[in-house]
């Protein structure tokens, strides 16, 4: 038995071991053991991964290889082959036919064939008796070609993004859970621990009050107290083998009357009759933990205290909300988030915040030499992450922010391992289901389901890249919402830049720009009018860029980055305006440079109508008209103070001027004028 758990640097992974007696037939064990040992202790063979020959395969990767190799070994054993050197090219051809005839999935067939190539890839490091034939198994064909599927040439991250409507709602509810509901849940969890330990003020008071009086005489005052406070009789759902019906929660009642559960159970009938006499509802939990202070839509987020049994479930939902915020807004991988420990949140020298952990993927993931601890890796994070980390640290005294359990000691907690990734994904989905069950309205679910597949943490990173590049309204407006995330994660403040994250951003930006160019060109061809000082330059850049993005094949991340650098039209659509960016003439550049900031792109917050980089399309004008109408209505409101009316008029005047100029240009060009939008009362 090989115990490989200590070799797994990622705490969220489940420990793995190799039971060779069950895994590989006895006659072939030496060959496969030798191959596994070499794989665990040497770098990738160039025949398998030419670009990673300076890295070692992860322990979990080798474990998965062995799972697939066991099928190959069993097949060889059935053919009485006892040494790997006795395997011929004809045998490998027969094994390929055997795999292709299996009813397994296409991915499983690919893994089974790849495992054979792994054994072959290490042949130069293996003794002669454990080497497969020198010729590469099944030639140069990829495993995709061997199993008959279309070969995927793209090296991009193909993890599907989470739909914008789903991600926006999930993030909003996660933040609301932390800010508004979280303190009540945390306080209830602390109160529940005191209750179970017998140190709660209510249990201490019960022991001091009731003394040696009979249990029967203690129940009446307890029931009257329930009546006074407006609570029901605590109940619990029996186990299925006991009928699964709702009954009295004897353990909780016992705590409240300084007794024990078995003794209270004898008075079950008396409790139920008293509850009926005072018209007390038999509730499905002991709703005792409170008070409730968090709000939602002008009132408390729940109308009764938190239940003693319910609180652990709510803690899981709160933990899932904290995980969502940290994982999504930091750009960290899920494994990196799950390994975070108490004290990981720190403030850098610039007044920003960093999370200190360790990378879970990449060449720097190998253990440090000379027995040193793995080097720390900081991730710069935005302020919204801070309350999530602080909430997790306040939930318990656990070293890990995401322990496997906060209520009991488990094998994983004894080994100081975090909650597994799969369990956390389940918790995130259960959190979404809970939100939808409690807070959905007539307009639909509070968190719309993702149309592609279930939400899981591996999709957060790709989705963040999409939002940073595109939301809201392109790169210019994204500076206001996600620009800080992009700057911190991409440029690697307080840490090394994450190259895979930058690759995701490059691909997302390339897709966004190509789609934008296509839409802009189609609008121009359909007769869209463009006004403003940069209108002519806008038309020229769109038509020039269309020739680039209409037929270019980009199959490498570097190609995407070079294409963006050399062929990006530098047209940025904002809310009610379009910036045809030129560094020399940008008004926002002057303000940013005066503040000591770099200005390598537009900043919509600093945009001025006097900037000669601006152009206005018909789409921009349609977005600007409602805003102009609102300001004009505010300026005409006689009930509003004069300073506010003057400010509204000052806002409306340049907008109206832009709209009028655009419409006049439309008429001069002979195009049909759309209906004018007037302000109420104007």
Image (tube, rainbow, N blue to C red):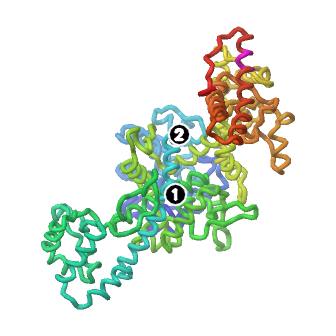
User: In the rendered image, which quarter contains the N terminus?
Assistant: bottom left
Spot occupied by residue 34 in the image (x, y as percentages of width and height) = 51, 61
**In the current view of this chain or complex, which residue is farthest to the front?**
638
- Residue at 53% of width from left, 53% of height from top? 131
User: In the rendered image, which quarter contains the C terminus?
Assistant: top right
Q: How many marks?
A: 2
Spot occupied by residue 382 in the image (x, y as percentages of width and height) = 64, 55
- Residue at 20% of width from left, 62% of height from top? 246
146 up-or-down from 493: above or below: above
Spot occupied by residue 51 in the image (x, y as percentages of width and height) = 66, 47
Front position in the image: 350 or 371: 350
Residue 495 shown left or right of residue 182 in the figure: right
Overall secondary structure of the magenta stretch?
A: helix
Characterize the local packing of mark 1: few (<14), some (14-19) or many (20 or more) Cα atoms within 10 angstroms: many
Q: Which residue is mark 1?
A: 323
- Residue at 43% of width from left, 73% of height from top? 190
Front position in the image: 500 or 618: 618
Residue 61 shown left or right of residue 534 in the figure: left
Any magenta on residue 664?
Answer: yes
Mark identifier at residue 164:
2
User: Secondary structure under badge 2?
Assistant: helix
Give how far apart the Cα atoms at labels 2 and 1 are: 19 Å
Front position in the image: 258 or 99: 258
Residue 301 shown left or right of residue 151 in the figure: left
Stretch in magenta: 661-665
Tags 2 and 1 touching, CB below 8 Å = no
Tell me which corner region of the image, top left, top right, bottom left or bottom right, holds residue 125.
bottom right
Characterize the local packing of mark 2: few (<14), some (14-19) or many (20 or more) Cα atoms within 10 angstroms: some
User: Secondary structure under badge 1?
Assistant: helix
First in sequence: mark 2 vs mark 1: 2
């Amino acid at each position: 038995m090989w115990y490989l758990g200590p070799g797994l640097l990622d705490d969220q992974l489940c420990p793995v071991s190799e039971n060779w007696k069950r895994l590989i037939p006895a006659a072939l064990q030496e060959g496969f053991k030798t191959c596994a040992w070499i794989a665990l202790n040497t770098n990738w063979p160039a025949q398998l991964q030419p670009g990673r020959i300076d890295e070692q395969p992860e322990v979990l990767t080798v474990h998965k290889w062995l799972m697939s190799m066991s099928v190959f070994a069993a097949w060889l054993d059935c053919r009485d082959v006892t040494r790997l050197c006795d395997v011929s090219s004809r045998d490998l051809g027969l094994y390929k036919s055997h795999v292709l005839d299996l009813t397994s999935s296409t991915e499983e067939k690919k893994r089974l064939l790849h495992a054979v190539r792994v054994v072959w890839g290490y042949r130069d490091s293996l003794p002669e008796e454990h080497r497969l034939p020198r010729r590469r198994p099944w030639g140069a064909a990829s495993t995709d070609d061997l199993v008959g599927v279309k070969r995927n040439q793209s090296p991009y991250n193909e993890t599907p993004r989470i739909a914008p409507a789903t991600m926006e709602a999930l993030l909003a509810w996660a933040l609301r859970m932390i800010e508004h509901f979280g303190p009540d849940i945390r306080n209830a969890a602390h109160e529940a621990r005191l209750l179970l330990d017998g140190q709660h003020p209510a249990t201490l008071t019960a022991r001091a009050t009731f003394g040696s009086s009979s249990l029967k005489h203690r129940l009446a005052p307890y029931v009257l107290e329930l009546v006074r406070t407006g609570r029901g009789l605590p109940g619990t759902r029996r186990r299925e083998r006991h009928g699964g019906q709702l009954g009295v929660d004897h353990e909780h009642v016992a705590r409240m009357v300084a007794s024990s559960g078995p003794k209270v159970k004898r008075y079950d009938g008396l409790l139920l009759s008293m509850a009926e006499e005072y018209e007390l509802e038999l509730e499905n939990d002991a709703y005792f933990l409170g008070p409730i202070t968090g709000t939602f839509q002008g009132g408390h987020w729940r109308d009764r205290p938190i239940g003693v049994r319910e609180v652990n479930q709510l803690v899981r939902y709160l933990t899932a909300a904290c995980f969502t915020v940290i994982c999504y807004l930091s750009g960290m991988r899920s494994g990196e988030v799950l390994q975070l420990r108490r004290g990981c949140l720190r403030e850098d020298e610039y007044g920003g915040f960093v999370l200190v952990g360790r990378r879970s993927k990449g060449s720097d993931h190998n253990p440090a030499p000379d027995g040193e601890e793995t080097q720390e890796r900081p991730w710069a994070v935005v302020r919204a992450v801070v309350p999530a980390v602080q909430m997790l640290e306040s939930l318990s005294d656990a070293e890990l922010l995401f322990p496997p359990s906060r209520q009991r000691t488990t094998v994983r907690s004894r080994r100081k391992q975090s909650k597994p990734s799969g369990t956390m994904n389940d918790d995130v989905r259960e959190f979404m289901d809970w939100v939808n069950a409690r807070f959905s309205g007539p307009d639909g679910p509070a968190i719309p389901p993702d149309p592609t597949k279930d939400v899981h943490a591996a999709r957060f990173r790709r989705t963040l890249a999409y939002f940073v590049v595109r939301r809201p309204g392109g790169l210019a407006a994204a500076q206001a919402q996600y620009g800080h995330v992009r700057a911190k994660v991409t440029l690697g403040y307080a840490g090394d830049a994450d190259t895979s994250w930058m690759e995701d951003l490059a691909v997302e930006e390339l897709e966004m720009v190509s789609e934008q160019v296509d839409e802009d060109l189609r609008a121009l061809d359909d007769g869209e009018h463009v006004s403003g000082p940069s209108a002519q330059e806008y038309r020229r850049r769109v038509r020039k860029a269309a020739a680039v993005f209409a037929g270019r094949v980009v199959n490498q991340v570097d190609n995407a980055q070079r294409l963006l650098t050399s062929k990006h039209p530098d047209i940025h659509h904002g809310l009610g305006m379009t910036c045809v960016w030129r560094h020399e003439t940008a008004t926002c550049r002057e303000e940013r440079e005066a503040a000591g900031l770099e200005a390598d792109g537009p900043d919509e917050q600093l945009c001025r109508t006097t900037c000669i980089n601006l152009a206005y399309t018909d789409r921009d004008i349609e977005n600007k008209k409602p805003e102009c109408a609102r300001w004009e209505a505010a300026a005409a409101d006689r009930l509003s103070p004069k300073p506010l009316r003057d400010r509204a008029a000052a806002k409306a005047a340049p907008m109206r001027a832009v709209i009028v100029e655009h419409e006049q240009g439309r008429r001069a060009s002979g195009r049909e004028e759309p209906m004018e939008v007037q302000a109420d009362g104007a």
